[in-house]
Amino acid sequence: MPYQKRNLEIKASELLGFSPVVILLGFRQCGKTTLARRLRPDWRYFDLERAKDFERVTGDFDFFLKEYSGAVIFDEAQRFPDLFKELRSAIDGDRRRKNRFLLIGSSSPDLISNCLIHNLLFKRVLLFLLLHSHADAIFFEGNKSLFV
C-alpha cells in the first residue's frame, strides 16, 4: 500500500523544533511508525518490542543516553513505563536543547495517562493522538488540545 502523506507531518516536524520530545500515539496499524520514520529518517530507531533493543535501552539508561544523547525514536514506548521519568531527567539536564526524542506508542490507557502526567509535570512533551483517518489527529500541548 503506497504511503499517504498525513496532514500533521509538517506540524509534527515543526514542533520537534520547539520541544525536546514529541509523542505519537494511536491505534494499531494507523501509521505511527511510518510517520515517525518519515519525519526523522536519519535518527536512531529502537523498537522496544524487540528484545535486543529493549535491553539496550533499559539496561543502563544513563549509559544509553551518553551513547545516544538525542535524535532517537523509541517505538512501542508503552513497553518501558519508566521511559518518561528517565527522559525527564535527561531533558532537565539540557533544557534548551530541542528536537531530541520521538516516542511512538499504542493508545493504551496506561500510556496515555503516563504521558499526560509527565506532560503536566514538566511541560516539555508535545503529544499527538493519531486517528484511523490519514487526515485526522489531535494535538495536545499542556492542557490545550486542537485538531490538526
Image (tube, rainbow, N blue to C red):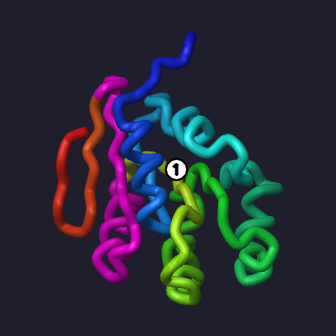
In the rendered view of the protein, which quadrant contains the C terminus? top left
x and y percent of residue 135 in the render?
31, 26
Q: Residue at x 39, y 51 (%)?
A: 108
Q: Amino acid at mark 1?
A: Ile
Q: Residue at x 52, y 50 (%)?
A: 104
x and y percent of residue 20 in the render?
50, 68
Is residue 42 covered in magenta?
no
119 relative position to 39: left or right: left
- Please, is residue 21 above or below residue 82 in the view? above
**Residue under circle 1?**
104
Q: Farthest residue in the bottom direction?
A: 93
Q: Farthest residue in the top direction?
A: 1
Tell me the magenta residue range: 109-135
Disc 1 packing (10 Å; few <14; some 14–19; many ≥20): many
Observer-nearest of 97 and 116? 97
Q: How many marks?
A: 1
126 relative position to 147: left or right: right
Is residue 112 covered in magenta?
yes
**Among the 4 quarters of the image, the one containing residue 114:** bottom left
x and y percent of residue 22 in the render?
45, 58
Q: Residue at x 33, y 82 (%)?
A: 121
Q: Residue at x 26, y 44 (%)?
A: 138
Observer-nearest of 20 and 34? 20
- Please, is residue 27 above or below residue 56 in the view? above
In the rendered view of the protein, which quadrant contains the N terminus? top right
x and y percent of residue 36 in the render?
55, 42
Observer-nearest of 147 and 129? 147
- Please, is residue 18 above or below residue 129 in the view? below
Q: Secondary structure at mark 1?
A: strand
18 relative position to 138: left or right: right
**Among the 4 quarters of the image, the one containing residue 41:** top right
